[in-house]
Image (cartoon, grey):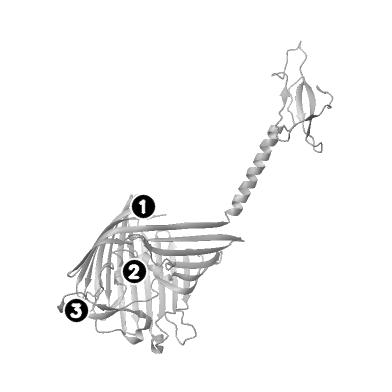
Amino acid sequence: MIKLSKSLLPIRVKPDVCCTVATESPFLFQKPWRRPKPLVQYTQPSGFGGWLWKREVMITHRIQSSCLTLEKLAMKKSLIALAAVAASTCAFAQSSVTLFGGADLNVRSVTSGANKFTGMAQDGIYSSRIGVMGTEDLGGGLKAGFHFEGGMNPDVGTSVKFDFQRKSTIGLMGGFGEVRLGRDYTPLFTVAGIADPFGTNGVGSSYNLANVVTVAGPAIPEAGSFATAQTASALPASKVETGTIYADPNAVRANNSLAYYTPSFGGFTVGAMYSFGGENTYTATKAGTMTSVKLAYANGPLTVALANQVTKGGVATTAAADSQKWTTNFLAGSYDLGVAKISAGYKTDKLTFVDDTLKSTILGVAAPMGALTLKASYVWRKGQEKVGNQFALGAVYDLSKRTSVYATYAALNNEEGFGMNVGSALASDFSGLTSKGFEAGIKHSF
């Protein structure tokens, strides 16, 4: 039986005072010969200006009170506040910005003929950089994103002009794939990392043989933007030769590019890019206009990719150069056996201005052993004239997910008519000589 006393005599309290249920006895059940003492409750009905109303409840049997005490009310308000904070956090998470980067330094020794360099170098297995990237969730599965990345020289603590030359793009992504605009890596360049376990960094990279060198004379005027430099050898008088280094300006990245990448369809993806070339506005020609297309398949341990890229070497002052082209085809694949990943690649470069096609073969293997990975590669490149080949061995030990130590050795054999070296510390004209390099360093990223 429950008896209620008069619910009069309101008590005024401060709004921040928490009043809880009070009882004059610590027991709900009294001895039968004693009259039960009342249980005192304070309630705060709405619309009474903050007044608390007192009522006494006589309990003669166990009951489950349905009254919401102020203590429970405070807990409920706290839960509501936490839910509001969580909701605001989810809304904030729709946009994200990430600062990233890393540094790679090593001690490198390169010997090419009678020339030798020993000193500090960088980018043995990783290109030193710093950048910022982010995405915004636009809803409906659509996102916007940006990626700005610049190179740096950690050996002397300076930036490479720090103008985001490594990558500067904005784009949209969703179920349709991704569209990117700006300065970006070409689809062709991404194939190189599949074939070569050393990638594009260090003395062991196949990119040591990427350029075309002629020693027959000066630059060809019709070569346009492909002719990057005149070379003057520092070799003894009997070996002094002059020539020109030719390189595809879009072999790695392309300016003013528009690219589209499809989502994966059963492991198949397609990437396509067009570069509008240089900033030669209102002229008959534009330097370095380019198209690059890649078809790739990745499923489980197997990865295969085929890319085609055509760069026009036109310059504003040479109309004839606009018809000159550098055409590259690159087929690469890798298969992870578990104990080791084997890789291979075949690349052709057709240059209309020297009437030659260069052919490159890349073989590689990488064997993980816990935190240690052993690597080896062989690269062979040949054209109408004999060129060169390179053999490389390397080891990488991961101290953590972001920090590694490494060592690499490579030997590049130049045949007559071709002169390249491992690394970039020495001049490039070493026709017929052997270039050897060793480096050991540390890489850390964040």
**Quarter of the N terminus within the rendering:** top right
Distance between the Cα atoms at labels 1 and 2? 29 Å
Closest to the observer, 385 or 324: 324
Looking at the image, is mark 3 or mark 1 earlier in the sequence?
3
Residue 230 visible in this rendered orientation of the protein: yes
Q: Nearer the viewer, mark 3 or mark 1?
A: 3
Q: Residue type at mark 3: give it.
A: Val
Residue contact at pointers 3 and 2, CB within 8 angstroms: no
Q: Is disc 1 placed on a helix, strand or loop?
A: strand
Q: Quadrant of residue 277?
A: bottom left
Work out whether 314 lies above or below 436.
below
Q: Which of marks 3 and 2 is in front?
A: 3
Task: Classify residue 432 as left or right of residue 88.
Answer: left
Which disc, if any, is residue 240?
A: 3
Which disc, if any, is residue 345?
A: 2
Residue 345 percent location from the top left of the image: 34, 69
Q: Residue type at mark 1: give it.
A: Thr
Residue 169 percent location from the top left of the image: 49, 68
Residue 229 percent location from the top left of the image: 31, 78
**Quarter of the C terminus within the rendering:** bottom left
Looking at the image, is mark 1 or mark 2 earlier in the sequence?
2
Closest to the observer, 64 or 165: 165
Work out whether 442 lies above or below 246.
above
Distance between the Cα atoms at labels 3 and 1? 43 Å
Work out whether 354 lies above or below 203.
below
